[in-house]
């Protein structure tokens, strides 16, 4: 039998939201209807043409004394976005549905909707995997 660590209620809710968001990513219709927004814990600062997004890092299970005295453990996780990533991230900050973000991105870059959808969806998956974006799959 596998040993499992006890999970707090907050961690359990966060895991449930993450599972729901991942499920929404697998169905294009659900993803288009979802609302994505920057994570509450994430901070964004301009860096050149792009954007630097930082969030607090979760402490690894092994990062306790005396190991943490020897091995440095980063306190934050940082992702640098290029100008296109910055544009999409800023569109997410306006409380739009994913479909509206894709339409705005397609219009700005004169792309067909399907091509913009593929690019923005892949980018959202990356941001979700790094906990920089929260996805509300129940919104309509």
Image (spheres, helix red, strand yellow):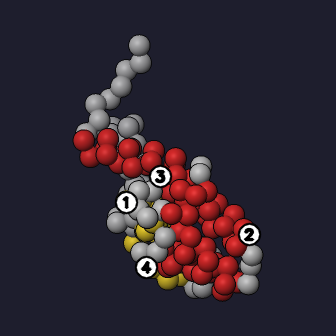
Provide residue 95's location: percent of width, then percent of height.
42, 75
Q: Is residue 49 left or right of residue 93?
A: right
| Quadrant of the frame with the N terminus | top left
Mark in front: 2 vs 1: 2
Alpha carbon separation for disc pair 3 and 2: 22 Å
Circle nearer the N terminus (3, 2):
3
Q: Which residue is mark 1?
A: 56
Alpha carbon separation for disc pair 3 and 4: 19 Å
Q: Which residue is mark 4?
A: 94
Q: Tag 4: Cα neighbours inside 10 Å, few (<14), some, or many (≥20)? A: few
- Callout 3 touching callout 4 (CB < 8 Å): no
Q: Which residue is mark 2?
A: 115
Point out the residue furthest to the top here. 1
The residue shown at (49%, 83%) is 46
Q: Which residue is mark 3?
A: 21
Provide residue 44's location: percent of width, then percent of height.
44, 75
Alpha carbon separation for disc pair 4 and 1: 23 Å
């Amino acid at each position: 039998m596998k040993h499992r660590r006890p999970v707090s209620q907050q961690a359990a809710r966060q895991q449930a939201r993450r599972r729901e968001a991942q499920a929404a990513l697998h169905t294009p219709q659900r993803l288009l209807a979802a609302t994505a927004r920057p994570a509450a814990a994430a901070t964004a600062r301009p860096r050149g043409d792009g954007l630097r997004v930082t969030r607090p890092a979760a402490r690894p299970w092994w990062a306790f004394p005396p190991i943490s005295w020897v091995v440095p453990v980063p306190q934050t996780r940082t992702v640098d976005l290029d100008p296109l990533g910055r544009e999409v991230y800023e569109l997410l900050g306006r409380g739009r549905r994913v479909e509206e973000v894709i339409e705005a991105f397609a219009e700005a870059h004169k792309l067909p909707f399907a091509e913009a959808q593929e690019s923005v969806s892949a980018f959202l998956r990356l941001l979700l995997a790094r906990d920089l974006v929260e996805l509300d799959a129940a919104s309509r």
